[in-house]
Image: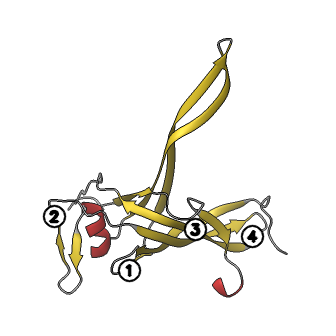
């Protein structure tokens, strides 16, 4: 039976996917090792009042970010985390004086389990993201290190910011 938007589900597996460079070399970075995917939206609220009571509101200066969290790391992900570039031939990561402004698209999937026990897969597509260099890198010999890379979600040429839809047919 086909699922509807009213069917309840729980997230079984976090969003893992691929970052694809926009323009330039069209480099792809596989991100299939994440334990967490956190998305945040913030904005400034504008309010108009009538007789001292809020009657009309809207949001402005909307900012969206998502953060990928993991206990595992690849050199590609480490370069994103520190605002660097990687020489794929030598795996040398270089952090330049000027922070790279490379933009990517992100497409990934996450697994859900419905109330009746069936398993489904959903696809998330974000057309334009940019790594945020306001990250931190902590390495430890005592505890397992965790890593988080945050991305700014930007407006692109599309008329949407991101989409989430069920994977169907050959895509599953």
User: Is label 1 in a helix, a strand or a loop?
Assistant: loop
- Is the residue under label 4 in contact with that under label 3 (CB below 8 Å)? no
Q: Is residue 4 left or right of residue 170?
A: right
**Rounded to the nearest whole Å, what is the CA distance between mark 3 and mark 1?**
20 Å
Along the viewing direction, whichever of 46 and 133 lies nearer the viewer: 46
In this rendering, does residue 125 appear at all?
Answer: yes
Name the residue at the top extreme.
51
**Mark 1 sits on what residue?**
26
Judge depth for marks 3 and 1 and give the one in front: 1
In terms of image quadrants, where is residue 119?
Answer: bottom right
User: Could you tell me which residue is drawn at 68 percent across and 11 percent down?
Assistant: 51
Name the residue at the right extreme.
1
First in residue order: circle 2 vs circle 1: 1
**Rounded to the nearest whole Å, what is the CA distance between mark 4 and mark 2?**
50 Å
- The image's mark for residue 37 is none
First in residue order: circle 4 vs circle 2: 2
Judge depth for marks 2 and 3 and give the one in front: 2
**Mark 3 sits on what residue?**
124
**Mark 4 sits on what residue?**
117
**Rounded to the nearest whole Å, what is the CA distance between mark 4 and mark 1?**
39 Å
User: Is label 4 in a helix, a strand or a loop?
Assistant: loop
**Badge 4: how crowded within 10 Å, few (<14), some, or many (20+)?**
few
**Mark 2 sits on what residue?**
96
Rendering coords of residue 169 (x, y %): 71, 85
User: Is label 3 in a helix, a strand or a loop?
Assistant: strand
**Rounded to the nearest whole Å, what is the CA distance between mark 3 and mark 4?**
22 Å
Name the image quarter holding the C terminus. Answer: bottom right
């Amino acid at each position: 039976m086909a699922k509807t938007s009213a069917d309840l589900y729980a997230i079984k597996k976090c969003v893992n996917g691929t970052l694809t460079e926009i323009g330039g070399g069209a480099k792809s970075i596989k991100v299939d090792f994440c334990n967490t995917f956190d998305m945040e939206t913030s904005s400034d609220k504008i309010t108009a009042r009538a007789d001292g009571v809020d009657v009309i509101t809207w949001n402005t200066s909307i900012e969206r970010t998502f953060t990928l969290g993991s206990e595992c790391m690849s050199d590609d992900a480490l370069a994103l985390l520190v605002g660097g570039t990687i020489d794929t031939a030598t795996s040398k990561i270089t952090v330049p004086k000027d922070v790279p402004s490379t933009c990517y698209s992100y497409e990934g999937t996450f697994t859900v389990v419905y109330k009746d026990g069936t398993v489904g897969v959903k696809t998330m597509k974000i057309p334009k993201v940019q790594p945020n260099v306001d990250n931190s890198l902590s390495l430890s010999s005592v505890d397992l290190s965790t890593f988080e890379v945050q991305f700014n979600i930007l407006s692109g040429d599309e008329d949407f910011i991101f989409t989430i839809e069920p994977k169907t047919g050959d895509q599953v």
